[in-house]
Image (cartoon, grey):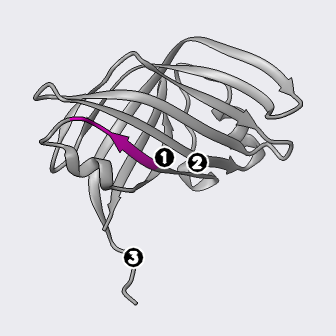
Amino acid sequence: MSELQSELLFDIKLYLGGDVYDIGTTPEAGHRMIVEVTRGEFEGPKMKGKALHLGADWLRILDDGTLVIDVRTQLQTDDGELIYLYYHGYIHGTPEAMEKFMQFEDDVDIDPSTMYFRSSMRFETGSKKYNWLNHTLAMAVGRRIQNGVAYHVYEIK
């Protein structure tokens, strides 16, 4: 059996903005919030482009403070191809880090070592050039940045 291998697919920054919709605590999902993704950019060895204003995080907050992320957005490559990106993951950390994370402020400075911020990413596209993404799993390591989040995204080989 071989070891799991990966290589950098791209780095992406997604900016959060617009309204934050706090749905409240629901019987089925727990505390639900919806946070808009307003724009972004990505760049890597095989592709680069921007994230369009067509996305959001359908976030759940568990009783222990863990965030369950459920993000869907659309990417447009610099050569005009469209890619649907969706990912799920977990964010948890020290109480101080989590409090800062949830403030959705313009200037958030959180030491990444105080948080676990990971997600699994999938892609869908009709593009012939990027068809290989339809069969690619990716893992991402995230961090909070000013006005948003950023990820190092790794293609799992």
First along the sequence among labels 2 and 3:
3
Amino acid on which the number 2 mark rests in the picture = Gly
Secondary-structure class at tag 3: loop
Label 2: which residue?
Answer: 89
First along the sequence among labels 1 and 2:
2
Label 1: which residue?
Answer: 142
Q: In this view, does 15 lie above or below 138?
A: above
Amino acid on which the number 1 mark rests in the picture = Gly
Residue 153 versus residue 126: which sits nearer the camera?
126
Q: Residues within 10 Å of mark 3 (few under 14, many from 20)?
A: few
Label 3: which residue?
Answer: 4
Q: Residue at x 27, y 48 (%)?
A: 133
Q: Position of residue 72 (x, y in %)?
A: 48, 31
- The Cα–Cα distance between marks 2 and 3, rounded to whole angstroms, is 19 Å
Q: Residues within 10 Å of mark 2 (few under 14, many from 20)?
A: many
Amino acid on which the number 3 mark rests in the picture = Leu
90 within the magenta span: no
